[in-house]
Image (cartoon, rainbow, N blue to C red):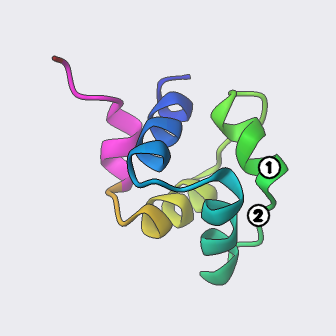
Amino acid sequence: MRTARTIEIVRTECGLAQRQLADRVTGLGRPMSNTMLSRIERAQRCCDADDLVAIADALRFSPFALLQGPAAP
């Protein structure tokens, strides 16, 4: 759940819509629709390692940082 929320936070901070991020991920060779991304962000779909790495790459963010979750205040 933490990773799902972190993906949404980082995507929003980057100023990307779900469709834009899904298009970036697809452009990197990992087909993803905005519906798939939405389900990942809502923790309704499993985010496997390949998805996580592709999403992180598309966000120019570390996969490990996505797994750790948002930084504590």
Question: Please, is residue 59 above or below residue 12 in the view?
Answer: below
Q: Where is residue 62 in the image (x, y as percent from the top left)?
A: 32, 56
**In the image, is residue 66 part of the stretch drawn in magenta?**
yes
Please state which amino acid type lies under the numbered disc 2: Met
Q: How far apart are marks 1 and 2 (CA)?
A: 6 Å
Please state which amino acid type lies under the numbered disc 1: Met
Q: Are marks 1 and 2 in contact (CB under 8 Å)?
A: yes
Question: Please, is residue 53 above or below residue 6 in the view?
Answer: below
Q: Where is residue 67 in the image (x, y as percent from the top left)?
A: 40, 38
Q: Which mark is residue 62?
A: none
Q: Where is residue 22 in the image (x, y as percent from the top left)?
A: 68, 63
Look at the image and give the residue range highlighted in magenta: 63-72
Q: Which of 21 and 55 is in front in this view?
A: 21
Whether residue 15 is visible: yes
- The residue identified by callout 1 is 36
Q: What element carries label 2?
A: loop
Sort mark 2 into few (<14), some (14-19) or many (20+) by Cα contacts within 10 Å. Answer: some
- The residue identified by callout 2 is 32
Magenta stretch prevailing secondary structure: helix
Whether residue 46 is visible: no
Sort mark 1 into few (<14), some (14-19) or many (20+) by Cα contacts within 10 Å. Answer: some
